[in-house]
Amino acid sequence: MVIGGGLAGLLAAWALRGYAERIVIVERDRYPDGPAFRSGVPQARHAHLLLEAGHRALEELMPGAREELLAAGAVRVPMSGVHWLSAAGWLAKYESEVAFLSCTRPLLDHTVLRRVRAEPSVRWLENTDVVGLLGTPGELTGVQVRARGDARARVRELRAEMVVDASGRTSSV
């Protein structure tokens, strides 16, 4: 089970494929149909980029993802073409094959989401809050969930052999 269906949660679920028979992603928001801003992503409207190691790691985890991003409008920016201003002043220009990918956060999220949605071992609980943990201090055995925004909604228990908390900085876990 993965708490949080943002980029970290989606990639965690993807990495669990083949190790878990069934993966449940519990996401508090509803996903848009396409690449669109979500209220649950606090910095979604900021400029986003994947440094060389980031897009290499994404490509290793999801072969073809880099080409999908480029085809959908991401831009490859060679580091040798960038002028960097640091606290110490302007950095020297240099030639490099290293590049980053620049794209919107909704494009990045949607590209990864589309891949994870196509994975048959992944199940989804959207518009759902995790309201408690199950188990003991030494062993986590699942979570308690309810419909988002309704404090009177019935709390359900979801058992799991493993729980990944990818709900971000506002996690109460």
Image (cartoon, rainbow, N blue to C red):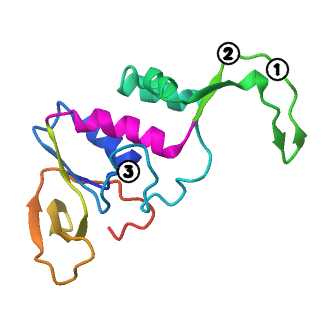
Residue at 40% of width from left, 45% of height from top? 7
User: Residue 41 location, x and y as percent?
Assistant: 46, 57
Residue 77 is covered by the magenta coloring: no
Disc 2 to disc 3, how far (Cα)? 30 Å
Q: What residue is disc 2 on? A: 97
Q: Camera-side residue: 162 or 73? A: 73
Q: Identify the magenta region.
A: 103-120
Q: Quadrant of residue 137?
A: bottom left
Residue at which label 1 appears: 94
Q: Position of residue 27 (x, y in %)?
A: 28, 57
Q: Is 117 colored magenta in this rendering?
A: yes
| CA–CA distance in space, label 1 to label 3 | 36 Å
The label nearer to you, 2 versus 3, is: 3
Disc 3 is placed on an element classified as loop
The residue positioned farthest toward the right in the image shown: 89
Q: Amino acid at mark 3?
A: Gly
| Amino acid at the residue labelled 1 | Tyr
Q: Main secondary structure of the magenta part?
A: helix
Please name which of the two marks, 1 or 3, marks the residue nearer to the observer: 3
Residue at 39% across, 20% down: 64
Could you tell me residue 134's position as x and y percent?
Answer: 14, 67
Q: Is residue 137 left or right of residue 15?
A: left
Task: Name above or below for residue 106 compared with residue 67.
Answer: below
